[in-house]
Amino acid sequence: MKPDPFVHAANSRDLVGPGPFAVSASGVDVALVRTGAGWRAFQGRCPHQGALLGEGEIESDRLVCRNHRWRFSLDSGRRDGGPECLASCPAAERDGAIFIDVSALKAASHRAAGIRSLDDLPGPRPLPLVGNLHQIDATKVHLTLQTWAEQYGPIYKLRMGPRRAVAISDPHMINEMLRARPEVFRRSANMDRIISEIGIKGVFNAEGDAWRPQRRLSVAALAQRNLRHLYPCIRTVSGRLKSRWERSGDTGEPLDFVDELKRFTVDVTMLIAFGYDVNTVEQADDVIQRELEIIFPAVNRRLFALFPIWRIVRSPSDRRLERALKNVGTWLSGLMDDARARLQADPDRAQRPANFLEAMLAAVDEKGKPFADDVIMSNLMTMLLAGEDTTANTLAWAVHHLCDNPEWAEELRHEADEAIGPIDVAEDIDVANGLARASAVANETMRLRPVAPVGLFDANVDTALGDYRIPKGTTIVILPRLPALDQKNFVEPLAFRPQRWMEHHSGAHEVSANAPFGSGPRMCPGRSLALLEMKAFLSMLYKNFDVDRVGRAEDVTELFGFTMSPVGLRVRLRPRRAH
């Protein structure tokens, strides 16, 4: 008698509405949909860039991927406007549970073995024990790795201490690796250990079964459908920033623009994720922001250190990091206590949480138990750090490039005047989403200046990338900026040309070579929110101010501190001379 191929994937009571639902059966991702004809189960990853289709939406009779809006028929699985077709598999409901036969999907996911050894690759000569780390300045690591890629090619070998590593800048290999997470590749174990040492074990560095429930909560909090009622937070903070700059504009004093933008992103993140109005924009100085500025650079220094000396002797910088983490942790604990009190006072609130913090407190893990406080705290810290640094740095780089391309500053101004009218900030999300020129500026900035130009991962199993065998435990260093600067993929790749992202232009030959939010099932869940923030901010800035950089363009340099930020960017803002 043959064994039953159907395996348990979910309980019906946990699946409310039509879906889609991201479930896993025998380690295979599945997008589950409730239709009038019963349950339908499709391959769980989009054929475009591997995003989880269960994180998408149902629109009429179509399953829509949340990342690039590819649409698939619920009946046939075929993609609208393209040849792709989703593979499906049988699904059945038995005694309140959903069972799926994923044998066909497992067979389709078989990976071919590579035929070439990493020993055949070129690369910089390592030293015993330290490998190539002695050649890497942690604040310029991306530049060193990119220089080696120019010298040795799109795949080369190196050693990070005693660990074997391979660096890749081929866009197809990068996409192949990211799509094979989390089963085949994982976040670097060394990075995980360093981040875990400072008390962060959230969705960013969680792996295996611990990742999926945390991912679901992050995606739900930042889903496109939720942005409509979250947008007023962006509008409020943008308005405060305008008032702040009008006051400073009267003096003509130059601003540390990265610092100013971090106020904006911290305030937006706090309102959206935690429901708390920290209002750093209107404060003269903010202690929490200063503490956050210590954490990322400290993690980066440890990540590329020759020896983990902090595990033996604590330096003054280590003690500063500990104080910063303690202060931020105490502050976040207070927010958790307040949120718990709200949930206890109004138990029905657990069914309609107002923000990410309340959702985390009300949710249960894969075993049906509440998330532990340290997991909740880790995710709060992850959300805060990611929300502050990445968007703020991208906006700062955008302003830097716009100072050298005043014609595009004028394009933003004209668009804002036409779309927003007499008010100062886009009134609602529909207006903000319609700002095509602001969107083009944001995308072109992320192409030239991705805030995450280096990624570190490990192979969980013996596998392959391209023609190369990748032994288990090998560290994979991805360099995603280089494909976006390659003339094979983009016309005039080093030029700032936002028009390449406009529908009526065709400057981008291979858009998939530019993936600032990553790809695959662990693509950044904050993608839609970040783009919305950027469009709203850029339109507000250029509608209301004349913007000039203080100093020369070449004096603004790239600093790698876990994210890539502009150093030396000072900007003078004056209220706009004429509307």
Image (spheres, helix red, strand yellow):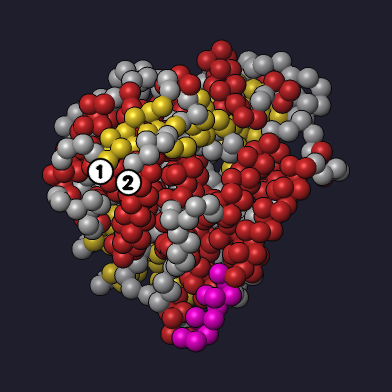
Span colored in magenta: 335-346
Asked if residue 540 lies in the magenta stretch, the reply is no
Looking at the image, which residue is at 33% across and 59% down? 236
Amino acid type at image mark 2: Glu
Count of numbered marks:
2
Residue 363: x and y, percent? 52, 73
Amino acid type at image mark 1: Asn
> Which sits in the foreground, 172 or 284?
284
The answer to whether one can see residue 26 in this image is: no
Please identify the residue farthest to the front as the structure is shown.
251
State the quadrant of the C terminus: top left
Q: Residues within 10 Å of mark 2 (few under 14, many from 20)?
A: some
Looking at the image, which residue is at 69% across and 20% down? 135
Quarter holding residue 373 = bottom right
> Which sits in the foreground, 89 or 142?
142
Label 1, on which residue? Answer: 544
Looking at the image, which residue is at 52% across and 55% down? 383
Task: Relative to 80, say whether 557 is above or below.
Answer: above
Task: Relative to 153, say whether 49 is above or below.
Answer: below
Label 2, on which residue? Answer: 246
Looking at the image, which residue is at 33% across and 20% down? 495
